[in-house]
Amino acid sequence: MHQLTIAELVKGLRNKDFSSVEVTQHYLDRIARLDKVYNSYITTTPALALAQASAADKRLAAGNTPALCGVPIAHKDIFCTMGVRTSCASKMLDNFIAPYNATIVENYLDSGVVMLGKTNMDEFAMGSSNETSYYGPVKNPWATDCVPGGSSGGSAAAVAAHLAPAATASDTGGSIRQPAAHCGLTGIKPTYGRVSRWGMIAFASSLDQAGILSRTAEDAAILLNDMASYDTKDSTSVERDVPNYTATLNDSLKGLRIGVPKEYFGEGLNPETAAHVEAAIKVYESLGATIHSISLPHTNLSVPAYYVIAPAECSANLSRLDGVRYGHRCENPKDLNDLYMRSRSEGFGDEVKRRILVGAYALSAGYYDAYYSKAQKVRRLIKQDFVDAFQSVDVILGPTSPSPAFQFGSKSKDPVAMYLEDIYTIATNLAGLPGLSIPCGFVENKPVGLQLIGNFFAEAQLLNAAHQFQQATNFHQQTAPGIE
Amino acid sequence: MAVDRSDIAKLAVLARIAISDDAADEVANRISTVLALVDQLQAVNTDGVLPMAHPLDAVQRLRADVVTEPNQRELFQSIAPAVQDGLYLVPQVIE
């Protein structure tokens, strides 16, 4: 049953081949038996899941239900879930029981989706390896001595190990697409503003966007249909109709103009990864697309701009965590300042502290213009590169990550080496564009990700291009060795 | 730009994060590495470029000035570390 895609689960539930309670129980059993190896969940919610599944079965029996009714998924532990611990993988929020649901959680509840639990991640989504979690690292099902990617490493490992048919995730600089690449999955980060951020614990508010990790592009399309919405509670949500993302999956790619940026194939790219991306380009040509060499000249500035903007926004967002209203509070504070200082120092891990300090520096008197304002100007130049490129192409294609999943500890001593992991994904967040990663090969038996970047609100086109690739290839159907 | 122990001490106060004396040099080194990376921005000509805060250059929405949220004080304070009579408790501030 755990081999089934979301599309197959939807069909099976409707045909009464199995009930939601049966599917949910099957996944809960697998998690209990197998997740000791991967550590992909922080919290499982078996009683809640079975109650939701039972309610979904009643709705299914009554008929006329939303497509996803009765389908179980996992939520990244960055999304507030009412009555359930929402930790963001931090000691700071280890005791935080969310008093409300994130909008995307609410959207899925309305559809009758069942929540299996909350997945592990880098602390406050700050990391590219899932090594910064307070609850310990997540192991990559393809190679358990390697990282699953981050920050949505738990969501990716859970789906790759068939401990959830799909999972929600979030992406601030590559946190959906890079774990998708490293775990052999489909991962989509929609356009900034397409999916509500309300109830998604904020890291860098102008970059954060929620999305999906799934096995196929078709599954991502089905799930995005219900995740995306206009939300008045999120002031950056965009008022725009949500198309039916599954309606255009089978459109022909004949005449699709694909741009290949030369900057994404330079120094630092693993040659075998590059060869698989080149082979994927040939697949697209055979499907009728035309390939065009393009340039995104400010690409090399995206990592530096990001590591000003993201820490600056994180230092502002995380200032709310002060030990007064919720979250960790130190023992016996001697005065108010001591309460703030010790609660925060005890509650945050090293990488989070480092980013808060960098952000405080970039925003401090005398440095604001040189750092924050400068980075925001460079950000516009980076966006303009894409605006210019989309004058002549429909989709941009390249690698998702410079190389396959790396071993634990190999980059954690050098923050800059870790930051360069996201060199091909960060520009998309800075520009606000949608991006997607799909598997396109293997290097050393580890998956390689192919990235597709679309114009604003072109999610349907990206999913169409990804689905057509998956009709012509079988990389997405491979399962990690040892997964029953 | 590199930072040293005294810069870290100032930042620690601004960010309300205590950095122990033992850790100060290492934190300064690590942050200096990040600042060396972001210093690449200084070489870029951005004359006449407007700072970009929102990818779609959206502006803040306005809504009618009516009450939309119910009072949920008890629910929200149920997860607080210390409350009394509907108020959050902190160490004494005023003598």
Image (tube, coloured by chain):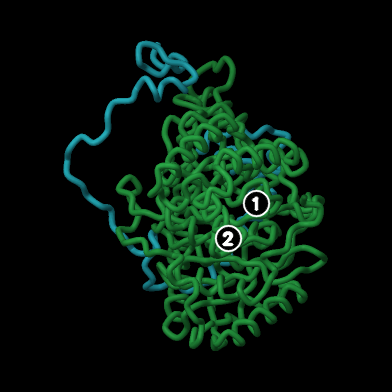
Chain colours: A green, B cyan
The residue depicted at 30 percent of the width and 58 percent of the height is A239
Q: Which residue: 42% across, 53% down?
A: A226
Q: Quadrant of residue A132?
A: top right
| Secondary structure of the residue carrying numbered label 1 | helix
The amino acid type found where label 1 is placed reads: Val
Judge whether A222 appears above or below A158 on screen: below
Callout 1: few (<14), some (14-19), or many (20+) C-alpha neighbours within 10 Å?
Answer: many
Provide residue A234's location: percent of width, then percent of height.
35, 48
Mark 2 falls on what kind of element? strand
Please name the residue shown 60% across and 36% down the image: A90
**Marks 1, 2: nearer the viewer:** 1
Q: Quadrant of residue A332?
A: top right
Residue position marked by numbered label 1 in the rendering: A159
Q: Residue A298, relative to residue A434: is it above or below? A: below
The answer, for residue A123, to whether it is visible in the render is yes
Whichever of labels 1 and 2 marks the residue nearer the N terminus, that label is: 1
Q: Which residue is mark 2?
A: A187
The reply to whether discs 1 and 2 touch (Cβ–Cβ < 8 Å) is: no
Q: Nearer the viewer, residue A466 or B43?
A: A466
Residue B13 x, y percent position in the rendering: 53, 35
Q: Specify whether residue A356 is in view.
A: no
Instruction: Confirm whether circles 1 and 2 share one chain.
Output: yes
Q: Residue B30 versus residue A442: which sits nearer the camera?
A: A442
